[in-house]
Image (cartoon, rainbow, N blue to C red):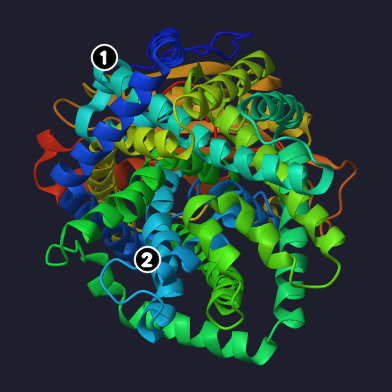
Amino acid sequence: MAHDNPPGRRDRLNAVVFHGSVSGILVFLILTMIYTEEAGAFFDTGLAWVSQTFGWYYMLAIVAYLVFVILIGCSRFGSIRLGPDHSRPEFSLLSWSAMLFAAGIGIDLLFFSVAEPVAHYLAPPDMTPESQEAMRAAVVQTFMHWGLSGWGLYVLVGMALAYFSYRHRLPLAIRSALYPLLGKRIHGPIGHAVDITAVISTVFGIATSLGIGVMQLNYGLAYMFDVPESLSVQVLLIGLVVILATISVVSGVEKGIRRLSEFNMLLALALLLFVLFQGHTLQLLDMAVNNIGDYLAGFVAKSFDTYAFAGEEANEWKMWWTIFFWGWWIAWTPFVGLFLARISRGRTIREFVAGALGIPLAFMMVWMSVFGNSGIDLVANQGIIELGEQALNTPQTTMYTLLEHYPYMGLTAAVVTVLGIVFFITSADSGALVLANFTSILSDVNHDAPVSLRIFWSAVIGLVTVALLMAGGLAALQSAVVVTALPFSLVLFAIMLGMVKALKLEGRKAEARRQIAGTAPGGDWRERLDRALDTSTRAGAAATIEHAIRPALTQFAQELESRGQSANVTEAHIEGEPLSSLTLQVDLENAASFVYQVSPHRMRTPSFLPADDDYYVRLDVYLSEGGLEKDLNGYTRGQVIGDVLSEYERHLHFLALAGQGGSVQAMPGSVGEPPLEAARS
């Protein structure tokens, strides 16, 4: 049933998820810092067990996630918006791409772009080391670990969170994607357990990335300023970066994270072009095209290659490379998925899938090909043996060693160090923002969690990173992330089932709307023209609510009550908005309720319409499945009743089409609460 949103409601802590997550992380920190050697051995044993027992499962799961999002994007559901029908993207394509790039890849590009291809050339899993075959396959194998497969995970969770939160006004949390399967039980112990799993997985995923990043940052400072490479220095660096990340995350997505992401994208592009044009440009371009072709041609076979017939050494390679990467991507999925949802409201599912898969993939392939092939060339053709040894033993040093063989080393080393610092900050700040949102109950999914909670999670990320470095550096980081990602991989399959069920329901509702044509508002055509050009003031919107919408909804509910239906009208306060939203709810026996909600939203006045103010008020209509592209400003009482009746007829027809009226479960719309998806911009 509906309930009012009381005046003055504020965001609050989700105590169960917060304390459950913190308790699990605290136990890990204490045990790891006290029993450092034992913890390192435990993580190594855990990685070996997961790889041997579930290696095949990881390979199949990653393919399943990717195939699912591509099918959804290409299907008829691809035109559905991640938000109400009238919503549009908040960020430009450039800003959106930059944030995709910085949050989803980050500092790991610097760490692995030279080291991984060179390592695959020198020590491939199933071919002769340092052969032409190994040289051709090295970068392609790197593409496998950084390409479509991993980004399919991010797209899956980002799509699900944006869909359920911005279209159906559920909390911006992993549990919301399970509503079609669990219903209101997502607000109970099962939902709490899912979110706790997501928080812990996220913390380990981010800590792994930051641990890898701080090792490279420490080497960069040692290279440039003779700062010693040691755990104590790395701890100080983590503390410094956490402080900077906290400053950024306090600034929010618009001011802090977006600007840092755009800056880093441009700086990374400049470094890429420098290496491309200072090296063997035409040869590198030839190799890039060749690598891309090999990747696309062999994608299916490589995706299922478990090295089952390649011997024990190849299986160990798979454990430290492919299985680690799949576990790492899964661990990062709640964090990056929520962040992608946060920056993608208003895009269609098809736009989101195509952009979030294609944009990072294109940049990654060019980046990895240019740097990877340049490194392999130094080792194979120019005899720089040191670079090969570093790739296998100290990968954080390889980027600097590569750049030593290009001009302006002082400048390029500084650029790499700055890139590392800013990548470090963007990963930490967006991670803290996401973790704060995960552990909060937000009154508006367009707003972020309180600043104090973001600061807390910045500190936790730093502490977990220090603990993992103490437990054994890179090996412990790799092992911990694979082990902690395993339970969350099961949640991802549940998210897929939830999306299928919700989208099928929405498809049936859309079919019902097409079959029952709506009645256009009547009245004189001049009045309709006035309405089309209207940019209503708050006073005008208030008059429409008072004289048309409220009496129309009340009259309709009373008429239904007189005919034996259960109907009521509720009014809800919207924080920061003097006008209230009104909701008509009709409860049908053993069937999904009909919901018709009208909510005021302050919007920027389009430049092509005459107006006395920079802002105007829309009176948007929301049904239980999300918002409609409809503004009731200027409607008369009779026109509002006519529109409500049309929507009610469509709802009844939808139930009839479904064929099992009693089994139709509607998606939630936080009935009676103010809609959360309309930005005040």
Q: Is residue 205 above or below residue 519?
A: above
Say whether residue 117 is left or right of residue 262.
left
- Residue at x-position 29% and y-position 66%: 125
Q: Is residue 535 above or below residue 129?
A: above
Q: Which residue is mark 1?
A: 189
- Residue at x-position 13% and y-position 62%: 308
The first of marks 2 and 1 along the sequence is: 2
Disc 1 is placed on an element classified as: helix
Say whether residue 573 is left or right of residue 439.
right
Residue 613, x across and y down, in percent = 88, 41
Q: Say few, some or many: other residues with alpha carbon within 10 Å of mark 1 (under 14 / 14 to 19 / 20 or more).
A: few
Residue 212, x across and y down, in percent = 55, 42
Q: Nearer the viewer, residue 115 or 442?
A: 115
- Marks 2/1: CA–CA distance: 47 Å
Residue 91, x across and y down, in percent = 68, 52
Q: Amino acid at mark 1?
A: Pro
Q: Name the quadrant containing residue 425.
A: top right
The quarter in which the N terminus is drawn is top left
Say whether residue 296 is left or right of residue 346.
left
State whether residue 89 appears in this view. Answer: no
The quarter in which the C terminus is drawn is top right
Residue 437, x across and y down, in percent = 53, 25
In the rendered structure, find residue 123 and report the number of the disc placed on it: 2
Q: Amino acid at mark 2?
A: Ala
Which of label 2 and label 1 is nearer to you?
2
